[in-house]
Image: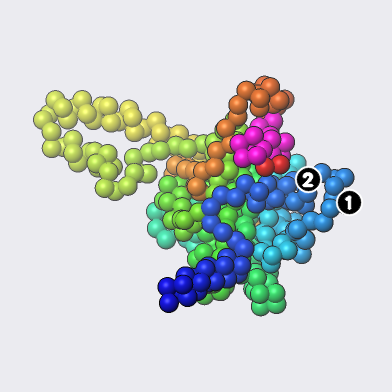
Amino acid sequence: MRQFLLLLFVFCTVTVNAQSPLQPGFDPAEYADLLSIAFHGSSIPDSTERKTKKDRYQLEFKSPETGLKNRWSLFLRDDNVAVISIRGTVKNATSWSANFYSPMIAATGSLQLNDSTVFNYQLAESPAAAVHAGWTIALGHLAPGIVEHIKSLYTQKGVRRILISGHSQGGAIAFLTRSYLYYEQQKGTIPKDIVFKTYCSAAPKPGNQSYAYDFDYITRGGWGFNVVNAYDWVPESPFSIQTLTDFNPANPMADIKSILKQQKWLIRLAGNMVYSKLERKPRKAQRKYEKFLGHKLYKTGIRKALPQLREPVYIHSSNYMRAGSPVILMPDEAYRQKFPGNGKDKAFIHHLYASYSYLLNRVYGVQ
């Protein structure tokens, strides 16, 4: 009887694994494929090898450019795992404006994309969660097509395992895409038995702390990663400004004025002076951030690209935080010799395919 139960357990385990080609946890080889797809449109980075070697990933669909010069591609792997690969920034002023248009908007709300299209979205559970305006607008233009193709793959090809990936701006939008699809599953818009795994590569910070907590929670257990070259400056952006209003309400610093009122007059006087100096400058910086990278950029750049887009209501916060389980590619002396310098002419030396693939090989032994 014991032998029978053991054999049954082994059989069930093998069967489950055979039916689940997508596994939790960081897979360096899987990420290497997605990194190559982001830059080369193929999991085989070498152009000569592509002529003789069969690619495991076949292109199924490439979207037209839309929104702020955004595009995504759909690949199907030979084990019936789909890949949603979101393109990063291209050499175009409109594409770059999507990055710089960085006031925060509510993580649950709606965007009037044009006179006839409203994008209703939910990207987090908490009403305190906020996200990057430019990348959410990009998501608004990409999401309908992504959802349509997910449903089609599910019904026509039985696809129930999907990788979401993107490098740089594509990684930032990949964060938001994963969040959007999670809450669409909760609403029943797309099937709940679809499993998603997300690799955000060289991605900037997508939202505030409440959003980051939410993303990390819905991808817990090894289903959402943020892969970063430690010398890459892009994941450091956008600017983060923390004010007292960004604190959790339970934090005593959020109600410091009430606490000071209970103190003796000398402590109260000194405390209020220090509080005013510490609180005033971050709040002033946040207002300027919102003015120049919000209202002014909307008028001078965003509206030119999307003339019917209605300016969103901004959240008065710029407390950007990193999201996703971090996978750090740490440079060593060999890397520094191969990728030297940090001058203006080398601003992206640590951000592109060569540096990331090199470190992936150095750290994980994957080409």
Q: Secondary structure at mark 1?
A: helix
Q: Secondary structure at mark 2?
A: loop
Q: Residue visible at 66% across and 74% down?
A: 158
Is residue 41 visible to us here? no
Residue 244 placement (x, y as % from top left)? 34, 40
Residue 155 placement (x, y as % from top left)? 66, 78
> Tag 1: residue type?
Lys
- Residue 45 numbered mark, or none: 2
Q: On the picture, is 100 further left or further right than 187?
A: right
Mark 2 burial class by Cα count in 10 Å: few <14, some 14-19, many 20+:
some
Q: Residue visible at 78% across and 45% down?
A: 45
Q: Residue visible at 84% across and 53% down?
A: 53
Vertical order, 103 against 123 (above or below): above
Is residue 346 visible to us here? yes
User: What coloring was used for the rendering?
Assistant: rainbow
Tell me the magenta residue range. Answer: 348-365
Of mark 2 and mark 1, the one earlier in the sequence is 2
Q: How many marks?
A: 2
Q: Which residue is mark 1?
A: 51
Taking the magenta stretch, the answer to whether it contains residue 350 is: yes
